[in-house]
Image: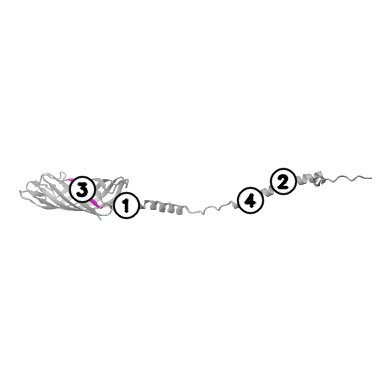
Amino acid sequence: MCKRAPAVAAGSCLTGQQRSTSSSVLPMRRHEQEARQDRRVSCSSFHPPPPWRPAWQQRVRRTVAAGLLALPLCLAATARAAPAVQLGYGFDDGHDVQKAEVAMLWDSGFAWGNPQGWQVDLQWEVNVARWRSSSDNQPNDLWEFGASPVVRIAWWRHTWVPFLELSVGPRLLTSTHTSANHDISTAFQFSEYAGIGLTVGKDRRFTAGYRFQHLSNGGIKDPNPGTTFHVIYLRYRF
């Protein structure tokens, strides 16, 4: 009587060749599954690159941004550049001469330094003055016309602004003497002055100052006694 062989596990029914084939197939399937998963992950995490912009567009964007950042400083500089009118009174006790003066000032646009601190700037000034002689020896009144650059050194930290100013420029007079004791030889004169002042107010519109001014013909002709004025003034910026 024959005995039946015991049941063999399903895996044991495979021949050696089948086992080698199955072992080589299964790893390939796992590899493919892992590759597919990697592709799905990489596709889901893909972000398109930002749109490309030409170089000139990028430069324009940077220029506009810089302009917006500089706008407050430009507005402050524009406010300072507004014209100003000045009224002054000067006297030279040594030659018995007084003068009343009207001047206009404009900002040149040239400035060096910190607009919120120490700054040096250049202004233009034109003026008309009337000289009056109080001498007892043949007094003579005359007119003065002038134009000159003014260098100002100011501290712009606060609403009140102290400053120093220096200027050299030509002057034209309508006469060559203010009295028999004061003969200046030529109608063409050079003006030099140094001054101090203070600008005040919320918008810095009001200024008061003092100038030490000297006029002479620079040695063009003798006599050349010169005229030295102490000038005080008030200024208003529009």
CB within 8 Å, label 2 to label 3? no
Which comes before the other along the chain, label 3 or label 4? 4
Which comes before the other along the chain, label 4 or label 1? 4
Which comes before the other along the chain, label 2 or label 4? 2
Which comes before the other along the chain, label 3 or label 1? 1
Of residues 53 and 207, the one nearer the viewer is: 207
Q: Which residue is mark 3?
A: 209
Instruction: Tell me the kind of residue under disc 2.
Output: Pro
Image disc number at residue 76: 1
Instruction: Tell me the kind of residue under disc 4.
Output: Arg
* Mark 4 Cα shell of 10 Å, populated few (<14), some (14-19), many (≥20): few
Q: Residue 140: give x, y in percent of width and height.
A: 8, 51
Which comes before the other along the chain, label 2 or label 3? 2
Q: Which residue is mark 4?
A: 39
Image disc number at residue 150: none
What's the CA distance linking mark 2 and mark 4?
18 Å
Q: Residue 97: give x, y in percent of width and height.
A: 11, 48
- Kind of element beneath mark 4: helix
Residue 123 placement, left or right of 93: right
Of residues 19 and 217, the one nearer the viewer is: 19
Q: Which residue is mark 2?
A: 27
Instruction: Tell me the kind of residue under disc 1.
Output: Ala
What's the CA distance linking mark 3 and mark 1?
22 Å
- Kind of element beneath mark 1: helix
- The residue positioned 22% from the left and 47% from the top of the image is 197
Of residues 64 and 157, the one nearer the viewer is: 157
Color scheme of the displayed model? one colour
Region of the chain picked out in magenta, as a range:
205-213
What's the CA distance linking mark 1 and mark 2?
76 Å
Q: Quadrant of the N terminus?
A: top right
